[in-house]
Amino acid sequence: MAWPARVLAAHAVPSASAQAGGGRVFQVRDFVFSLAGYAGFGVGYIGYMTFVIALLREQGGSSGSITLFYALLGVAVVASSRIWAGLLDRHRDGQALARLNALLGVAAIVPALTSSWPLVLTSGLVFGGVFLSVVASTTALVRHNLPPAQWAAGISAFTIVFAAGQIVGPTVVGFIADGPGGLARGLVFSAVALWLGAAFAMKQKALV
C-alpha cells in the first residue's frame, strides 16, 4: 500500500464545498437505517461463511466438491466489483445496500432448502459475487453523502456495527444449529437477518 499512499498524498484534497455533502458532519442519526442494515449484513453473511461447509459435509458433499464450491465462490468475489460498480455509483441512498442484502439472503437460504448440487453451486457463486460489494456499498454511501473530511468517521461507524454483527452472527447461528433444526435452520436465520437488513436499508434516504 506504500505506492498508492504516496500517490494520494501528492494530490491536494478538494474543498469540502466542492464535494458531495458540502460541509455536513457525520451524525449517526442521519445513517441509522443503513447502519442497521449493515449490522444485519454482518450477522447474516458470517453465519453462511462460517457454517456452510459444515452443512455441505452434513449433506454428503465430498472434499473435491466442497473445494470446487469455495473456488467458484472466490472467482465470483474477484468479478463482483465489476458487476456492481454501476449500482453503487447510481444510488446515493440505501438502495444498493438493500438490494445486495436481499440477494445475499436468497443465496444464503438455498443450501438450507435443498442439497441439489447445481443449486448449491449457484448459491456459492451468487454469494461470492455479492458479499464484498455490500461492504463497498457502505463506503459508496458515505462518499456520496459526506465531504472527504468526514469519510473516516462515517466508514468507522459502519465498520463498528459490522464487527458487532460478525460477533453476534456465528454465536446465534451456532446456538440454533445445536438445536433440533441443525445447521439448515441456522442458515435460515442468516437469510432472515440479511432480509431484515435489506428492509432497514430501504428506508435510508440520501442526505444531499
Image (tube, rainbow, N blue to C red):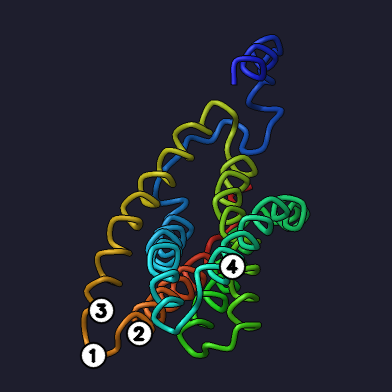
From the top left corner, tell me how far across and down residue 60 is, in percent: 45, 83
Mark 2 to mark 1: distance in Å? Answer: 9 Å
Residue type, mark 4 in image: Phe
Mark 1 to mark 4: distance in Å? Answer: 26 Å
> Which sits earlier in the primary sequence, circle 3 or circle 4?
4
**Given contact means CB atoms under 8 Å apart, are the residues at marks 2 and 3 in contact?**
yes
Q: Secondary structure at mark 4?
A: helix
Q: Nearer the viewer, mark 1 or mark 4?
A: 4
Binning the other alpha carbons within 10 Å of mark 2 as few (below 14), some (14 to 19) or many (20 upward) gives some
Mark 1 to mark 3: distance in Å? Answer: 8 Å
* Figure quadrant of residue 6: top right
Read off the residue under disc 2. Answer: 185
Which residue corresponds to the image point at 53% horizontal and 61% vertical from the top-left?
204
Which residue corresponds to the image point at 48% horizontal and 75% vertical from the top-left?
195
Binning the other alpha carbons within 10 Å of mark 1 as few (below 14), some (14 to 19) or many (20 upward) gives few
Binning the other alpha carbons within 10 Å of mark 3 as few (below 14), some (14 to 19) or many (20 upward) gives some
**Given contact means CB atoms under 8 Å apart, are the residues at marks 2 and 1 in contact?**
yes
From the top left corner, tell me how far across and down residue 205 is, in percent: 57, 59
> Which sits earlier in the primary sequence, circle 2 or circle 4?
4
Binning the other alpha carbons within 10 Å of mark 4 as few (below 14), some (14 to 19) or many (20 upward) gives many
Q: Secondary structure at mark 3?
A: helix
Mark 2 to mark 4: distance in Å? Answer: 21 Å
Q: Secondary structure at mark 2?
A: helix
Read off the residue under disc 1. Answer: 180
Residue type, mark 3 in image: Ile
Read off the residue under disc 4. Answer: 69
> Which sits earlier in the primary sequence, circle 2 or circle 1?
1
Q: Nearer the viewer, residue 145 or 164?
A: 164
* Figure quadrant of residue 139: top right
Which residue corresponds to the image point at 65% horizontal and 44% vertical from the top-left?
144
Q: Report the side of 94 relative to 177 (left or right).
A: right
